[in-house]
Amino acid sequence: MSGKRVDGQAAYVLHLHPYSETSLVVDVFTREHGRVPLLARGARRPRSAMRGLLMSFQPLELGWFGGGEVKTLARAEWLGGMPLLGGRCLLLGYYLNELLLKMLPREDAHVALFDAYAAALRALAAGSDDAPELRRFEKALLKELGYGLTLDVDMETGRPVVPDVEYNYLIERGPVRKVPTGTQGAGADETAAICGKTLLDMAADDYSDPRTRRESRRLMRTLIAHHLGGKPLQSRRVFIELQEL
């Protein structure tokens, strides 16, 4: 990106951290420029106009300038129309943000992923069932990063997945029909068994079946952990700890 000014960019705040006594570095996800770190000068001052604007999960319009790794935030406008997230949905929102922060390269535009993220936030804010929204977003994220899921074809035979057959999902390939223990070596890229119906339900974004919800969550957790390369998700840890309490 050149050093010229950029303006009128739809964005969401992913993370804030202090920079000096008065400023913030703001990691934002923008529709046309991807993930961008911005220096918000003076944003920590009590009378700063930006102090109350830079909120996570709220649609913003931003402008910035600069040619370095960290640009300088020039303006921010709250676009409104999004209820505040609370409780469980707030934690799930932080989970989405952490995925973007840890998996999305800087200044790599993904318009479809931005739209999927905005749709997930709107659904969570409206009180929609969160499981389908999380799975849709996770699928969109992996697809945009070049790890799109094959869900309806047996990669061993090329035949359609059968609902009442169990499969293993090979992370770098896709589903293959499960064979009896001992006749196929288990590799590091192989997931636990998953029902063919679950795979087909995921392809159709249908998570009404409790088994589909369980198995799809397990599958996506395994795939994301693989592509994170061992980096832990703090939001998931916090969520589990709160559930235990």
Image (cartoon, grey):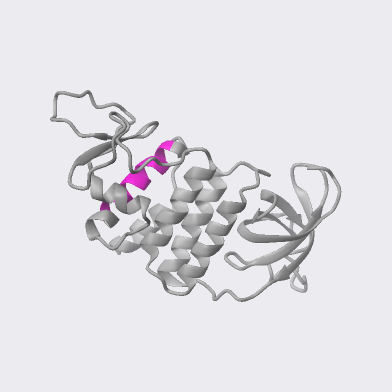
User: Number of marks in the image?
Assistant: 0
Q: Which residues are magenta?
A: 214-226
Q: Name which residue lies at 57% across and 58% down.
A: 115
Observer-nearest residue: 111 or 5?
111
Indicate the position of residue 222 as horizontal and vertical percent values: 35, 42
- Assess whether residue 79 is covered by the magenta stretch: no
Q: Is 100 located above or below residue 242 in the figure?
A: above
Q: Name which residue lies at 50% across and 71% down.
A: 85
Indicate the position of residue 238 as horizontal and vertical percent values: 40, 57
Q: In the rendered view of the protein, which quadrant contains the N terminus?
A: top right
Q: In the rendered view of the protein, which quadrant contains the C terminus?
A: bottom left
- Assess whether residue 225 is covered by the magenta stretch: yes
Residue 11 picture quarter: bottom right
Q: Is 182 located above or below residue 80 in the figure?
A: above
Q: Is residue 72 left or right of residue 160?
A: right
Indicate the position of residue 103 as horizontal and vertical percent values: 53, 43
Q: Is residue 152 left or right of residue 102?
A: left
Q: Name which residue lies at 24% across and 45% down.
A: 196
Q: Is residue 40 left or right of residue 181?
A: right
Q: What secondary structure prevails in the magenta region?
A: helix
Indicate the position of residue 48 as horizontal and vertical percent values: 77, 70
Observer-nearest residue: 176 or 26?
176
Outermost residue to the right: 4
Q: Name which residue lies at 43% across and 55% down.
A: 136
Outermost residue to the front: 159
Observer-nearest residue: 14 or 47?
14
Q: Is residue 86 left or right of residue 208?
A: right
Q: Is 123 located above or below residue 220 in the figure?
A: below
